[in-house]
Image (tube, rainbow, N blue to C red):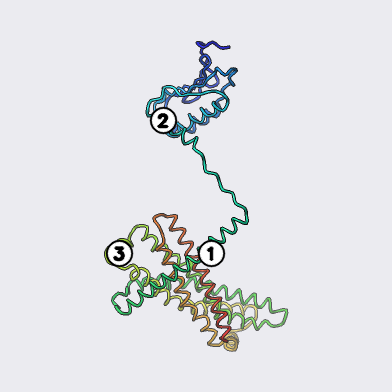
Amino acid sequence: MLKRDHQLVLPTQARAPGFRVELRGTTFRLVATGAWTVAEATRLDAALKRLRVPIPPTPDFTGEMDIAGIAEIDTAGAFLLQRTAAAWQASGLRTHYAGATEAFRILIEEVQSRDRATRPEVETRSMLQGLREDLTKASTGVWRDAVELTAFLGEVTAAFWRMLRQPWRFRVTSFVHHLDHAGLRAVPIIALICFLIGAVVMQQGVVQLKPFGAEPFAVNMVAILALREVGILLTAIMVAGRSGSAFTAEIGSMKMREEIDAMRTLGIDPMDTLVLPRVLALVVALPLLTFLGDLMGLAGGGVMAFGVLGLDASAYMDKLREAIDFKHFMAGMIKAPFAAIIIALVGCLEGLKVEGSAESLGMHVTSAVVKAIFLVIILDAVFAMFLSGIGV
């Protein structure tokens, strides 16, 4: 047995950074030196993980953490010391601290109390229970969004009537600005998308109808789809992704910087300044973009008809006149103002709900696009069934 006054420095640990391990009598000592801070934590952690203390041959052996040589310590260093002491305790080596100042002692005790604190148990739930909770949460969210959107529609309507009674409240500059951004600058992408979709629908229509010898009826299909569904639906989805997200980002950024609160302090109504011009601009822009989308969809179908059916421009126009009526055009155009109101309301409402973080802004921008597209598709389906039911 080793004598109490005999000192042995373990050679394998003598070169460890920030500490050394000694055996004095029946006491294993970890003598810590230098800085035990987060800057040195990685190096100290690697050395401590390599540290192996022999199993004490008798219960008389104890462990000691001598921290008198530590120049500075923070929470990371105290955690490393506590983890090592806990490991020694778990192996049967009773361990205590020595050389601690009052400040060091308080820090180490706080880390010990946090380490011993009871961690909350992770609640486990069955798949059926999780599905039920998710469905309940989704249903509650849908109902809450419906109520908020309805209330916001009421606020916008009230602001619109105030503007009609007091025309000087109308922000002409803001209206023209948003009409330019949401309408004029969206022309190239709307025209391109509708042109390509019209061409694709024509090509696929010809392919599917060719076995029946009914290729010319592909023109009828493209014409009716472009005017009743494709033109308005594609345009509304593109505008929702482009302008709806922009409305949320613009208003949300102002909300984060507390500019909207400053406007209210100055007596400026955000509904008149921020929301109403955007709603009115989109109500004007979306029908015009839908009309452009209808024309480009028919143009794309015409180009493809020339390529796969051999129809020239005059023959294609004759078939269009035979296939479509004014009611088909109006069936698509009548949806445009309602889709514009939905997109603008959702975009502005989500912007006003942004809190003071970039994460909140990104979340609400995503939510605005998803909700607007979903509601536009629902609106289109309701109008399609209603118009078909009344024979339009």
Q: Which residue is mark 2?
A: 73
Q: Which residue is mark 3?
A: 264
Which of the two labelled residues, at mark 1 and mark 2, occupies the earlier sequence position?
A: 2
Circle 1/circle 2 CB separation < 8 Å: no
Q: Is residue 284 above or below residue 139?
A: below
Q: Residue 109 lies in what quarter of the image?
A: top left
Picture coordinates of residue 384 (x, y %)? 56, 79
Q: Residue 353 lies in what quarter of the image?
A: bottom left
Q: Nearer the viewer, mark 1 or mark 2?
A: 1
Q: Residue at x 65, y 75 (%)?
A: 204
Picture coordinates of residue 85 (x, y %)? 51, 27
Work out which quarter of the rendered image holds the C terminus and state it: bottom right
Amino acid type, residue under disc 2 in the picture = Ile
Work out which quarter of the rendered image holds the N terminus and state it: top right
Q: Residue at x 43, y 58 (%)?
A: 361
Amino acid type, residue under disc 3 in the picture = Arg
Circle 3/circle 2 CB separation < 8 Å: no
Q: Residue at x 68, y 76 (%)?
A: 207
Please, which residue is most extreme toward the left here? 266
Horizontal relation, residue 200 to residue 165: left or right: right
Mark drawn on residue 139: 1
Please, which residue is most extreme toward the right here? 211
Q: Residue at x 49, y 33 (%)?
A: 42
Name the residue nearer the viewer: 283 or 173.
283
C-alpha gap between disc 3 and disc 2: 50 Å
